Amino acid sequence: MRTRNREEGKQDWAGRLATAGWLVVAWLLIPLGVHAQTLAWPDKPLDSNAALERQVPVLARKLLAAYQDPDRERELINRVRLQRVAGQPKAALASIAALREVRRATAPEQAEVLFIQYEIDADAHVRGEANPAAAFRRAFARLDDRQAARTLPVMGADLPRARRDLDAALQKQHGKVAIEQADALELIRLYQFHAVYASLLPVLPDLLAEDEANRYLIERDVVIPGADGTSLRGLVVRPRKMTAPQPALLAFTIYVNDDWSLSDAKAAAAHGYVGVFAYTRGKAGAPGTPVPYEHDGEDAAAAIDWISRQPWCDGRVGMYGNSYNSFTQWAAAKHRPPALKAMLTSASTAPGIDIPMQGNVFLNFLYPWPLWTAGNATLDGDSYGDEQRWRRLDAAWYGSGRAYRDLPAIDGHPNPWFSRWMEHPAYDAYWQAMTPQGDEFAGIDIPVLAVTGYFDGARVGVQHYFDEHIRNNPKADHTLLIGPYNHFSMQAGAARVQEGYEVDPVALIDLPALRFQWFDHVLRGAPRPPLLKDRVNYQVMGANAWKHAASLDAMANQRQRLYLRPAATGAEGLLSEHPAGKRGESTLLTLDLADRSDVDWNPPTLSMLDALDPHAALVFRGAPLTAPAELSGLFSGRLDFITNKRDFDLNLALYEQLPDGRYLLLSWHLGRASHARDRSRRELLAPGKPQSIAFRSERLTSRRLQPGSRLVVVLGVNKQRDMQINLGSGKEVSDETVADAGKPLEIRWAGSSHIDVPLLR
């Protein structure tokens, strides 16, 4: 089953900025144009990367001679790269201008600076300048502050990584005299990227410092009072042209890297606000020991109070940020600081709800995260980036059958934060103290905008905050926007392809610009962003349309009940509109949880699949649709069963099988059976007796289903190396070893089990 994996965990606010120069901007990550075409290259077999690299310009010229693509934007992106590598910088500049014109129709602010790093490079080559400094100054001289701020995410790159990737692509061509066009385009991309940044990066620090000195007043290593006499550290960026106090926009974070923080703070200042970053206690040289989550709420509230009293602030503070930086907003709002006037949350994590566990099931991708963020005063990127170490750890733990609590011992290094989390497997007072609860949600009366995506693993947290805020304060000014976005889209921009799914053109909105449109509306009386027409604003995948609803329930006008019935023959079950025809109808799932021979099985990382891999699960397939239908909202259901265990971890996924046979993951549900009624209190199952689990998915979706499509349910239990394994003994799951597995798990799913799907017809 699909889970939030470690790679997705890295794509949070910090991971986005750390890799922004590498990725360029997310909406440019589109297919390179795959054609069944082979080119003769090189002229003779070469077994040296250096020799092959010298021939790459020849390859670029060959490709250019006949290159075309029906997707105009994709064609221009590839032409820029091909022309630069082919030694045609003047043509590359013309292609950049044409690309900006195409992009201006959907994202005018982005269009003005699109590919500016490549413009600088090409301009220097046209003029015969070996150093790009003069070209940088010419390019930035035409930019206003907002435009200059939009360039910052691409003004950086991981050059060693770029070199490694280029070398790997060259290595693939050793001994060959032909190359597929898709491989050739990718090789050109890697070559061009490395060449441009190898020239640009050495001069960038001085050039950026020169430019920022003309635009901003920057205070680094600012001392900010926290709660209970704690001293925090942060930075403040003001517009140099500011003549009167202005609202401040605060990001409170555990991710200490001033380059990342400056990028966002300068963007705030470029829009006329004061940009402020404050770091978790014990970080960035502040006294104390860093601890994730536990003190951020009270410290952020104290920081807001301090900011509101500074001479450059007009007394109003807005908070913003992604992932952890959205959690800190809710943590601060729990304390209701009077100066906090607005929140813009995106991809919000909710401790105890979606991290480090979801549905009370602990997820391995969070294991190295506290070592990265709280192991020192900044960030321990060396250990966090050691992917082989974490893959080995997952495999070693799973294969050994040892207790989940033993992960630090297996790794050979202590992880005190993980060990502390293991003491709180229920959503107890430890987790509840971090974010608002009950009446605290009711008291949050400031405007909130929440942004998430159908491909964002943190939409569970976004859903939790939305549900609880509305439930406790029905009149809450809480607006939700969701589309086909991933965990870092709010910062990096909307991508044209998400997890194998090509998004509708209408979804390619300028998400970074939306941040300041929202704050201008709330804090300065500007018009409300037109996309935010109602409380729930959602893009219908496959319909190329946005819709708006007053509530989640209003997204659909009916709920279709589909029963999970056994088929008369064959291994698959039926997803049927008709209830069980006879009493006792059931489908049996049998699984040996002690068998770890599947240690090398990998859950899918994409949402668009060519085929299902129902690991540890059963498949129930519906009949083809005879007419189009819109599935919008949260699916729910009730599972009736008899099992021989005292517990298990339910993993249920809902797919659309497209008429062409591919599968699109629409939504899924993960949850511990013993916590199905209450995530804060465990109730063990009664082996051998009929019982039920009622559930509601926390993963919102909207999709236009095609005629000929089928709905498919994959129903099983968790059994994979990157998640905690519940062996069903009734002991604390973190203490179970493979010796507790006993007999194979048996779950007999009754034919009365069903899901309820929200449809608009």
Image: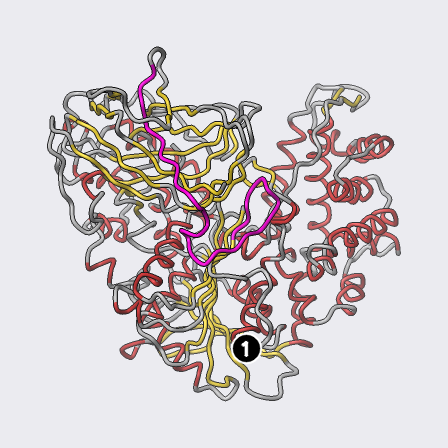
606 up-or-down from 143: above or below:
above
- Compared across the picture, whether 274 is left or right of 473 comes to right
Residue at the image position 48 percent from the left and 56 percent from the top? 549
- Residue 456 showing in the rendered view: yes
677 up-or-down from 248: above or below:
above
- Residue type, numbered disc 1: Val
Residue at the image position 87 percent from the left and 44 percent from the top? 88
Q: Position of residue 674 (x, y in %)?
A: 18, 40
Q: Look at the image and give the residue range highlighted in magenta.
A: 538-567
Q: Position of residue 449 (x, y in %)?
A: 47, 64
- Compared across the picture, whether 159 is left or right of 650 comes to right
Which class describes the residues within 10 Å of circle 1: few (<14), some (14-19), or many (20+)?
many
Q: Position of residue 365 (x, y in %)?
A: 37, 43
Q: Which residue is mark 1?
A: 274
Residue 649 covered by magenta stretch:
no
377 up-or-down from 100: above or below:
below
- Residue 22 showing in the rendered view: no
